[in-house]
Image (cartoon, grey):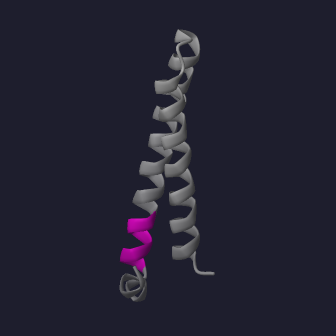
Amino acid sequence: MTVQTQIQQALASAQSVEASLTQFSLETENQQAKQTFQQLAQQQKNIVQQLQTRYEQVLQEEPQFKNNQ
C-alpha cells in the first residue's frame, strides 16, 4: 500500500468522524453535549485539513501519484 493510499484512507476516516460528530451535535438536546460535540468536530476538521495538506504535498513530491487519483 502506498503512502498516497494510506493518506487517502486516513483522510476518508477523519472526514467520517467529523461528519459523525457534527451529526451528534445536531441531534442532541443536551446543551453541554452539543457544545462538546461541536468542539470535537472543529478539532477533527483541523485534523482533516492537516491530512489534506499532507496529501497535496505527497502529490507534489511524487508526481507519479497524480495519475492515480
Residue 46 located left or right of residue 1? left
Q: 61 above or below 18?
A: below
Residue 33 lies in the magenta stretch? no
Q: Quadrant of residue 9?
A: bottom right
Q: Main secondary structure of the magenta part?
A: helix
How far from the left and from the top, in percent, is residue 59? 39, 75
Q: 32 above or below 5?
A: above
Q: 43 above or below 59?
A: above
Residue 10 located left or right of residue 48? right
How far from the left and from the top, in percent, is residue 13? 57, 55
Residue 58 lies in the magenta stretch? yes
Query: Which image quarter is the N terminus in?
Result: bottom right
Residue furthest to the top in view is 31
How far from the left and from the top, in percent, is residue 32? 57, 11
The number of callouts visible is 0
How far from the left and from the top, in percent, is residue 18? 50, 42
Q: Residue at x 42, y 58 (%)?
A: 52
Q: Residue at x 47, y 50 (%)?
A: 48
Q: 48 above or below 36?
A: below
Q: What's drawn in magenta, residue-wise?
A: 55-61
Query: Which image quarter is the C terminus in?
Result: bottom left
Q: Residue at x 48, y 42 (%)?
A: 19
Q: Quadrant of residue 21?
A: top right
Camera-nearest residue between 23 and 41: 23
